């Protein structure tokens, strides 16, 4: 049906899982990159006392504003306003989380990493169980639809091998579906007597897992937003401790003139 351009619930679910896994992978890679960067930045900023991150952000703002001097009056005003807003958001984030040093930022990144890994493991477990339950409930319908064919084969008139073989040939497709459904349901824990109580319990568990998974997925947005803020702070710090070639040359000339 998907190949014919008809969306299906299974196809939508598989696409959702694929997109979620891609988001998780990207988020985990960026967090790992932040931790690696912090180690490098700590070496470059090694002093008896670690520099204040908020002060570095203010230095970054000064650097950006100096670079905007070559713009037109309108361009300079727009660039300065953008820089001010970005730095204000970053400073607010640091103050809100009581972060002033790279060491404290590292602790926060590690906490973020732990939370993302926990959500990743939890959602993987739920996805496996959800897939199992959906498959089982799908097989319930197939089982019920083909059960009369199987029951008919068990009647006395099909006791003779030739009659039974003829019936099996005539209903080969229905019987294959029935046997497959019965096997899957047995593996999923369905009692031999086919309990409706078990089916109802599966539906209830499926609904609960889907709600819990949706709630966990909603947690990714603030975590991703926080990671982006951290990455922006990383960029600002790098601009200060690793000026671009032009800025380095300007700084060298200014030093020489002094």
Image (tube, rainbow, N blue to C red):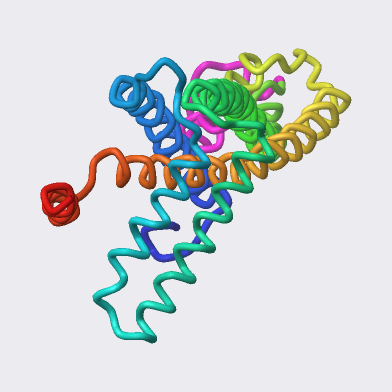
For image coordinates 51% across by 30% down, the residue present is 176
User: Residue 158 in the image: x percent, y percent?
Assistant: 62, 23
**In-image side of 54 versus 132 (left or right):** left
User: Residue 15 in the image: x percent, y percent?
Assistant: 47, 48
For the record, the magenta segment spans 156-180
Q: Is residue 251 above or below residue 183?
A: below
Q: Is residue 157 magenta?
A: yes
For image coordinates 41% across by 65% down, the residue present is 5
Q: Is residue 192 above or below residue 195?
A: above
Q: Is residue 36 magenta?
A: no
Q: Is residue 92 above or below residue 203?
A: below
**In-image side of 9 versus 247 (left or right):** right
Q: Is residue 58 above or below residue 81?
A: above
Regarding residue 222, the answer to whether it shows in the image is: yes
Q: How many marks?
A: 0
Residue pushed farthest right?
197
Q: Front-most of 155 and 34? A: 34
Majority SS type along the magenta span? helix
For image coordinates 46% across by 32% down, the residue present is 169
User: Residue 131 in the image: x percent, y percent?
Assistant: 59, 32
User: Residue 180 in the image: x percent, y percent?
Assistant: 54, 25
Regarding residue 164, the answer to whether it shows in the image is: no
Based on the displayed image, in which of its 4 quarters is residue 205 positioned?
A: top right
Q: Front-most of 231 and 258? A: 258
Which quadrant holds the N terminus? bottom left
For image coordinates 78% across by 38% down, the residue present is 207
Q: Front-most of 53 and 257? A: 257
């Amino acid at each position: 049906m998907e190949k014919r351009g008809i969306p299906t619930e299974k196809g939508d679910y598989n696409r959702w899982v694929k997109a979620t896994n891609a988001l998780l992978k990207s988020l985990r890679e960026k967090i790992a990159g932040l931790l690696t960067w912090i180690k490098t930045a700590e070496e470059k900023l090694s002093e008896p006392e670690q520099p204040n991150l908020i002060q570095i952000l203010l230095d970054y703002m000064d650097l950006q504003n100096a670079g905007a001097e070559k713009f037109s009056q309108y361009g300079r005003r727009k660039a300065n306003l953008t820089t001010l807003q970005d730095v204000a958001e970053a400073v607010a984030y640091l103050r809100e989380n009581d972060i002033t040093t790279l060491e404290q930022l590292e602790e926060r990144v590690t906490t973020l990493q732990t939370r993302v890994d926990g959500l990743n493991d939890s959602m993987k477990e739920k996805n496996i169980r959800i897939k199992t339950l959906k498959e089982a409930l799908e097989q319930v319908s197939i089982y019920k639809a083909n059960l009369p064919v199987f029951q008919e084969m068990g009647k006395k008139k099909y006791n003779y091998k030739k009659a039974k073989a003829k019936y099996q040939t005539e209903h080969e497709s229905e019987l294959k579906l029935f046997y497959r459904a019965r096997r899957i349901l047995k593996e999923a824990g369905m009692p031999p007597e086919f309990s409706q109580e078990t089916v109802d319990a599966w539906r209830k568990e499926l609904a609960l897992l889907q709600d819990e998974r949706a709630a966990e997925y909603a947690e990714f947005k603030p975590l991703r937003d926080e990671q982006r803020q951290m990455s922006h702070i990383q960029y600002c710090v790098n601009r200060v401790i690793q000026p671009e070639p032009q800025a380095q040359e300007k700084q060298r000339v200014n030093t020489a003139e002094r």
